[in-house]
Each structure stands twice: as structure tokens, then as C-alpha cells.
Image (cartoon, rainbow, N blue to C red):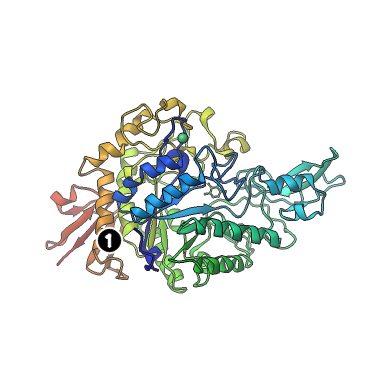
Amino acid sequence: MIDLTDDTWWRTAVIYQIYPRSFADSNGDGIGDLPGITRRLDHVASLGADAIWLSPFYPSPQRDGGYDVADYRNVDPQFGTLEDFDALVARAHELALRVVVDLVPNHASADHVAFQAALAAEPGSAERGLFHFCDGLGEFGELPPNDWQSMFEGSAWTRVTEIDGTPGQWYLHLFDETQPDWNWDAPGVRVDFETTLRFWLDRGVDGFRVDVCDALIKAPGLPSWPYPTHGVVQPIEGRTPPMWDQEGIHEIFRDWRAILDSYEGSRILCAEAWLPPERTARIVRPDEMHQAFNFAYLEQLWDADAIAETIVSSLAANDAVGAPTTWVLSNHDVMRHASRFGYDGPVALEHGVGVDDPQPDRPLGLRRARAATLLMLALPGSAYLYQGEELGLPEVTDLPDEARQDPVWARSHQQIRGRDGCRVPFPWDDSTSSNGFSSVAATDTWLPTPSYYAEFSAAAQGLQLESTLSLYRSTLAVRRSADLQGSALEWDSMPNSGTIAFSRGDTHVVTNVAGEPVPLPSDATILVASDPEVRATRLIARDTTVWFTTI
Ligand code: NOJ
Ligand code: CA
């Protein structure tokens, strides 16, 4: 069971992200679901994680993988029922796994009753006031109210047809046109989200990962911003983008924190905000959120200096507010790190890869991914893992284009493939053509399941001592037992350029990113090594991380 008296669990927690559509299908419709997850929670517990984070499973037309929520306080029938959710939480808690769910407060689905009511109501009505409805520019209002662009390409505005059939107002959507942005200046929106928080807290959840939480408040007057935003948001010409990181977001987070704090145990908020470390840190001040993903770290290339600098700046920014740093290398929005590191040079994180694009070097990517993971798990703070990274899964780069579901593919007029390649069903074993994910054929799972994923299956890797799965298990076990968590990071002198070296208490960590092989000290006892060869050679070669002690 989880320990409700432990109010610091989240400071060091390893939290495993589950993408419900792709984890395990219990009823043979080719789509993962809540009962499927419940049955497979042993895998997460035996990995050594402390919690799971579930991407959205709420009623939704699934235009953006469920990040288009039509009803915030229910379960989509394709994923199960509220009773299935309760059973999942009960089983997780039994296994000492906490449960974090996704809160999507920036936008609803266009199918949400409030948006349907807004469409049916008059301009200027209270119903429209819950969203950002504006008159268009131009003689006939035929131009969008401003020049903002959608994160998924194209304008961030869509024009509606009024009930009398005439072309009418426009509404704002920072994402797909089926995801209208809520107007957080409307008190009704705030009240409704507080009800949603309480609904899930009452059901026993241990926290919320908060989707694009830095976009809730828009600058007054919605001033011009003609630039697209991708990745970590930076001011341009000294201006903060008017849709990100506005001061008003903090008051909302403080209200939510007070609600969470009124519940038994330590329930947490984790910010999804693509901001630089010093801005992210403001979200985790003591009375706001507990954690915020460190996307500046995720964005770093396999470059020792860049990685070390980001570690230093992230720790400094978070130390200044007394918050832990929250590391992450993969999630459902970015190319899997086992593929990302298989390129030399930058990759567009969210753009996906097609068969005709340059392909990652798979062995190199996996070798570096194992090293990168061991480095991340040695850093002070919390870490998020994304389902499948413990198997070293590569991005699927040969999805047929007609199978693609990411809305960016259509909105970009088939220029940007998007994020489907990291969302492919999880390979459990080789018992069916869809690798134990579902009883249906590989071609009938919601995204087709590639046959080569079978070689990465959890069942196969569980039996191999040197598999990536075994490496994750042993590393997480050492992370727990070695007194890493209690000790701050101390930089050790770098053995040579291209390496990163530090200690946590008695544990030394060396990552050789691009340097000459580093000999292990003669008295070193290896705790974990991303490359098993190190045990024989006693050399830390390129693309390798080793944890060791010398006592
Ligand atoms: C971030 C989510 O992780 C992503 O999947 C989604 O498309 C956008 N926010 C919009 O909700
Ligand atoms: Ca199913």
C-alpha cells in the first residue's frame, strides 16, 4: 500500500507514464483500456517505479489522443468505466504505486456541452464568455481577430456559423480547431475545474499532470504574435509571447494547491510547460505546483557541455525556490530517445519520421539512450519514464501515412507527420501478431503494430540479464537502495572533455558522451553500467554511463 504519511515522496519519485490507448487491450477492440492497464500494473511495480501517470482516458472524440476532453468527470467507454478506474487505483495502491492523472485545463473538446452551448448562444453571451470568442477583422469580419498560430499549424482561430446561418464570430484554439481554449478570466471556468479536481481527488488520485498549464491566461487584448512556437518558449525581441507564461497563471496554481493540500496524503501537481529553467522554477514555488517537467533538459542533444550546463542551470533555478527538478527524456509528444540519439545533430522533436526520411542509427541510438537514462536517473529530483523506454523501443518510422492520427498531419497539409511513431502499441510478448497487446491482428490495432517490436517484448527482455528492461530494473533498485536520494550532487573533476562526472554521496557517476575511454579507478565497484562490456574492460567507452563506488 502507499504510505499516506510520506509527504516528500514526489521529490524523488520515478513516475511511469502510461498512454492508455497503447498499453494493453483487454477486450479485443484494438484499443488499450483501463482494465488492460490494471492487469499489467505488475510490470510497472516490478520495474521499481513509484507512481504512474495516465494520459487522458476521459470521454473524447479523440481528435488529439484524448487531449480534447468532452467530459472531465467520466471515463470514455472505449477505455472502460468509472468502476474500472476505481479498480485500477485500488490495484495500483495495493502495489504501492501512486496514480497521477492528466488535467487538460487550457482547452476542451468542441464536443463539450459548454462549447456546444456557446455555439448555440449569441455573441456577447455568458456561454460564449467561457471561451475566447471574438469578432473578426476586415470589413465583414472575414479575417481572424489576430495573427496567432496554432501549435498544430495554421491559424489559431476558426470562424463559426451563427444559428441564423450567417458567418459569425471566431474562437481561439492554440491547438486543433476541435480544441477551443477556455477563457480563464471567466469565474465559471475556475469553479468548474475545481469541481473536477475534487472529483478525482475524492476517487483517490495522488496528483495531476497539468497539460499546457502555462497557456491558461492570455495577455489582455490578445496582442499580435506572428511567430510559431515549438519547443521551449523564448521571449522574442524582449517580449514574452502573449499566450504563454503570463503572470496570472500563478494565482490559479495557488488555488489548486490549496485544494490538494486539504486532502489526506501528499497529492501533487506536475506542470507541463515548455519554458526555460528559470521560468519553470516560478511554477514550483512552495505554494504552487510540486513538479514541472524539465523540457530544457529533454531538448539537449547528446553533447556533454550542453547537458552539464542544463543540469547546472536547472538545479540552480530550482534550488532557489526549494523545489526538486523533474527530469524526463521521452513522452508521447516527442521522438523516443532511443531514436533521437541515433541522429547526429538536431531533430524536430514532434515532427515524426517517415520511411523516406533519414533514418536513425538504431544500435547507436539505443546505446546512447541507455547511457542517457542512467545519467538522468542519477540526478537529484524526480524522473518520468515513458512506457516502452524500459524496452529500449525505437520510434516507429515506417507507419503507413494513411494510419496517422496526429492532427498535425492533416493541418500541415501532410508536411509534418507528427507524434504517432512514439505511440505505437506496447509489445508484451510474441503470443499474438500484435505482440500480446491485443487479441486482434497487428494491422487492426488502433495504430498498426510493427512485427519487429516483438524482439523488444517485455517477456523476452525479462529473461535476459543484459536487456534494457533488466538494466532499468537494476538501476531503479540501486537508485532506491544506494543512498543517492539523501545526497546532493557534487561535481567530480571531468576525466577528459566530452564526459560528465559527479557524485551523489558515495556513488560516482561518469557518462562518457564523446571522449576518449575513461579507465575505472582500480578500487571501483560497479553498481550499474549502461554497457555490460565495462565489467570486463574496466573502461568507460563513448556513449556509456557507469555508477560505481570506491569503498
Ligand atoms: C500537450 C500534450 O502532451 C499533447 O499530447 C497535446 O497534443 C497538447 N498538450 C494539447 O493538449
Ligand atoms: Ca480495448
Do we see residue 519 in this rendering? no
Q: Is mark 1 within 8 Å of ligand 1?
A: no
From the viewer's side, name the closer residue of 91 and 317. Answer: 91
Instruction: Judge from the rendering whether residue 153 lies leftward or rightward of residue 140; answer left or right.
Output: left
Q: Is residue 194 visible?
A: yes
183 versus 350 height, above or below: below
Which quadrant: the C terminus? bottom left
Q: Residue 536: x percent and y percent?
A: 13, 49
- Mark 1, other Cα within 10 Å: few <14 / some 14–19 / many ≥20: some
- Outermost residue toward the right in this view: 139
Q: Is residue 472 above or below residue 165?
A: below
Q: Which quadrant of the figure contains the N terminus?
A: bottom left
Q: Position of residue 376 (x, y in %)?
A: 35, 57
Rendering coords of residue 33 (x, y %): 46, 39
Q: Which residue shows up at 61% across the image and 47% down it?
A: 71
Q: Position of residue 216 (x, y in %)?
A: 63, 59
The answer to which of 77 and 183 lies nearer the viewer is 77
Q: Does residue 363 appear to the left or right of 439 in the view shown? A: left
Say which quarter of the image contains residue 512.
Answer: bottom left
Q: Secondary structure at mark 1?
A: helix
Quadrant hosting residue 496: bottom left
Please name the residue shown 60% across and 44% down the image.
152
Nearest the eye: 529 or 197: 197
In front of the other: 258 or 508: 258
Instruction: Give the residue at mark 1.
Output: 480
Find the residue positioned furthest to the front: 83
Q: Amino acid at mark 1?
A: Arg
Q: Residue at x 21, y 44 (%)?
A: 466
Residue 464 horizontal side relative to residue 360, left or right: left
